Image (spheres, grey):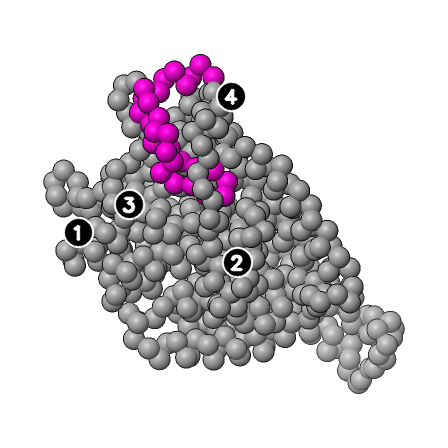
């Protein structure tokens, strides 16, 4: 019912439905399933209209085309695709935006924004409880930004270039195994995008041996994991139609695939990537406390959240899943169930989390179509572990660790003074309490002296651990020289830690 209503309302609402299908933190699985296949039934525009758009956008550059097929090979709510050929015989794909679509979308978005603000202002209308629990105007603004980005084909061209650069070389596959189309920037504008035509077949239609299908399933999974956990910039719509099988390389050994249509992408900021990685690690290694903490840190809740109740629910969920064999664990189902809990607790997650889960669902579905026994967790685990190693051992991670150690040292130094202020305020009843006991002054002196020594001990151990971790991040290749800043930080921390601990040992022996 909802699906049909959105189709009848027009392209903006079709896109809204498609976006909502990526938000399992907002909608239940029955709605997600209904909206996943949402496509507007839009006939292709006549060739005369398309030709006028090409002339207006490309001008004299249109003369570089030897021919363009007048019948669209695909048509959607925002545009349609034609096959063409350049003067040198190169086959290309032209993506042309529908005329007037931006104005239509802006008008629809204005109505959506007004409804969201009405529901969020405490009205008694149906749906006002959702408005109090979720930031509906923020969700509409997020949808608007996503949709406006899709209308800018120059942005899609840049997305394609960046993804192609990120995936050109990786330790997870051989060079040339993963392709993205080349962009013809001189023949592209905000409303026309010209791309290299890549000839291939859909993965499900490829004639591959069972062993080959297992390799292709693992390759497609690694491609997405690389983007999410190592690059922080990922293709957010990797459905089966956007993957092509290109056959084996010239040696007949390595299977090759292509990734198409980079209009919908997502960028994870370092903090979000860190928390998502912690979330996935907590799920994979059955750590409910880590999962609950990641969800609470990542999400936004207008209402109070009981973190212990949240942890208990994740504990029950993970125990239910991990009684199964590893190869039978469906990570998509597990993540959707994990997001059901914050949805019921009315914790709103960032949109990138929904896109992350949607992308995993798509690629896991593709992999299981190729290999029903495919274990997504086993293939994804090394990439997640590599992401953790990258976070810890990178130069940026070393600098962050150094800053954290300095902050921790300052906190330890300030602790005795803060405790003294607290005891003083307690003594003068500034906190509503007034209590003294016999020998209090002697106790306070001993406590202060002990706390100072404890603080110094913590600082010393912290310096030793920080220095050791920084030394572990040095390059291990023969002849490699560690960065000068990391070297000085590590040696300074080790010397400081050793000195502080040596002094404390001497003081204890003397006393």
Say if mark 4 contacts mark 2, CB within 8 Å.
Answer: no
- Determine whether the residue tagged by mark 1 lies in a helix, strand or loop: loop
The quarter of the picture where the N terminus appears is bottom right
- Determine whether the residue tagged by mark 3 lies in a helix, strand or loop: strand
Looking at marks 1 and 2 on the same chain, the residue that comes earlier in the sequence is marked by 2
Say if mark 2 contacts mark 3, CB within 8 Å.
Answer: no
The tag on residue 56 is 4
Front tag of 4 and 1 = 4
Say if mark 3 contacts mark 4, CB within 8 Å.
Answer: no
The tag on residue 411 is none
| Magenta-highlighted residues | 59-86
- The residue pinned by badge 2 equals 4
Q: Examine the image and state in which quarter residue 110 appears.
A: top right
Front tag of 1 and 2 = 2
Front tag of 3 and 4 = 4
Give how far across and how far down residue 278 sits, in percent: 47, 61
Q: Is residue 255 above or below residue 56?
A: below
Residue at the spot 39% in from the left edge and 50% down from the top edge: 238
- Determine whether the residue tagged by mark 4 lies in a helix, strand or loop: helix
Residue at the spot 58% in from the left edge and 34% down from the top edge: 100
């Amino acid at each position: 019912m909802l699906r049909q209503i959105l189709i009848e309302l027009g392209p903006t609402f079709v896109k809204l439905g498609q976006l909502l299908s990526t938000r399992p933190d907002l909608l239940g699985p029955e709605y997600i399933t209904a909206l996943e296949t949402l496509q507007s039934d839009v006939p292709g525009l006549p060739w005369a209209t398309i030709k006028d758009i090409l002339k207006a956008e490309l001008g004299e550059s249109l003369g570089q085309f030897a021919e363009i097929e007048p019948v669209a090979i695909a048509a959607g709510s925002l545009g349609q695709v034609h096959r063409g050929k350049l003067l040198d015989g190169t086959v290309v794909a032209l993506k042309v935006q529908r005329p007037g679509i931006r104005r239509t979308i802006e008008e629809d978005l204005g109505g959506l924004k007004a409804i969201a603000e009405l529901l969020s202002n405490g009205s008694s209308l149906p749906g006002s409880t959702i408005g109090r629990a979720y930031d509906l105007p923020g969700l509409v603004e997020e949808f608007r930004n996503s949709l406006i980005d899709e209308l800018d084909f120059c942005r899609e061209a840049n997305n394609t270039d960046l993804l192609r650069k990120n995936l050109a070389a990786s330790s997870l596959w051989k060079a040339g195994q993963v392709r993205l189309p080349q962009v013809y920037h001189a023949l592209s504008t905000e409303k026309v995008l010209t791309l290299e035509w890549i000839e291939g077949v859909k993965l499900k239609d490829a004639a591959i041996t069972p062993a080959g299908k297992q390799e292709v399933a693992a390759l497609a999974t690694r491609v997405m994991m690389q983007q999410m956990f190592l690059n922080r910039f990922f293709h957010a719509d990797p459905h089966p139609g956007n993957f092509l099988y290109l056959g084996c390389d010239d040696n007949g050994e390595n299977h090759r695939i292509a990734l198409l249509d980079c209009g919908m992408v997502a960028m994870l900021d370092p903090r979000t990537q860190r928390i998502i990685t912690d979330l996935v690690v907590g799920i994979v290694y059955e750590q409910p406390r880590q999962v609950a903490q990641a969800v609470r840190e990542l999400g936004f809740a207008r209402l109070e959240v009981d973190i212990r109740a949240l942890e208990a629910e994740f504990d029950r969920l993970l125990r239910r899943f991990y009684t199964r064999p590893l190869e039978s664990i469906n990570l998509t189902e597990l993540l959707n169930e994990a997001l059901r809990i914050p949805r019921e607790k009315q914790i709103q997650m960032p949109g990138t989390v929904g896109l992350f889960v949607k992308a995993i669902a798509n690629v896991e579905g593709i992999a299981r179509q190729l290999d029903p026994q495919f274990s997504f967790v086993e293939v994804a685990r090394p990439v997640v572990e590599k992401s953790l190693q990258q976070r810890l051992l990178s130069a940026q991670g070393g600098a962050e660790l150094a800053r954290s150690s300095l902050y921790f040292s300052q906190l330890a130094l300030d602790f005795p003074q803060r405790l003294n202020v607290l005891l003083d305020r307690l003594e003068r009843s500034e906190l509503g309490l007034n209590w003294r006991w016999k020998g209090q002054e002697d106790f306070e002196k001993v406590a202060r002296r002990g706390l100072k020594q404890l603080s110094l001990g913590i600082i010393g151990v912290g310096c030793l651990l920080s220095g050791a971790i920084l030394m572990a991040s040095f390059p291990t290749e023969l002849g490699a020289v560690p960065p000068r800043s990391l070297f000085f930080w590590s040696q300074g921390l080790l010397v400081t830690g050793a000195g502080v601990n040596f002094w404390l040992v001497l003081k204890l022996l003397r006393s």
